[in-house]
Amino acid sequence: MPRPDKIEAVREIAEDLKTSNVYYFLDYRGLTFAEATELRARLAKVDASLKVVKNTLAKIAAAEADVEGLTELLQGPTAIAYCHGDPVRVAKTLQDFIREKKKASIRGGKLERSLLSPADVETLSMMPNREQLVAQVVAAIASPLSGLVNVLNGPIRGLVVALSQVQEQKANAA
């Protein structure tokens, strides 16, 4: 008979897996308690959370949540970073922390229905975040529009210059 605390842990993990479409798996070996707390604080700033899980309970929870393919990611000490916001910002935060501390490593992740390798997470972390992508799209849309405004203003500007020259000539002749 499973213990009530383990049943509750499985339920919590399954709920987290169901409610989050993006999560990253970390091998947290070597992190001190203070470093893990710092990582949690950094992740909280980008709308994510970090939870250390027991692999056996996480495998049961994944089965209950109908999430497939996590078995190979659940080997050794495992922490799961659940992303509730922009997946790119969370991946950047994790990669920056790992580079800075030279501890822990990313095993992979899950983005919607796709499993991510560590290289995929690295690539994801190099992408521009949502705000930067929106700015690039707006700039791409605005660029032709500003060119059109310049083209349409050209004849009007020419007419103003011509009228100004005619006015000057009449003023000089008088």
Image (spheres, rainbow, N blue to C red):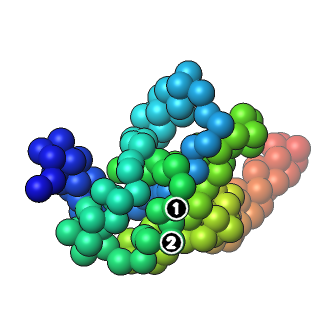
Q: Position of residue 27 (x, y in %)?
A: 58, 50
Q: Which mark is residue 72?
A: 2
Residue 111 occupies which quadrant of the picture?
A: bottom left
* Quadrant in which the N terminus is drawn: bottom left
* Quadrant in which the C terminus is drawn: top right
Q: Position of residue 83 (x, y in %)?
A: 40, 52
Residue drawn where x is 40% and y is 57% of the image: 55
Task: Please tell me whether mark 1 sits on a helix, a strand or a loop.
Answer: loop
Q: Amino acid at mark 2?
A: Glu
Q: Which mark is residue 75?
A: 1
Residue 110 occupies which quadrant of the picture?
A: bottom left
Residue reaching furthest to the right: 172
Q: Is residue 132 visible?
A: no
Q: Is residue 29 visible?
A: yes
Residue drawn where x is 18% and y is 42% of the image: 5
Residue drawn where x is 56% and y is 22% of the image: 34
Q: Which mark is residue 23?
A: none
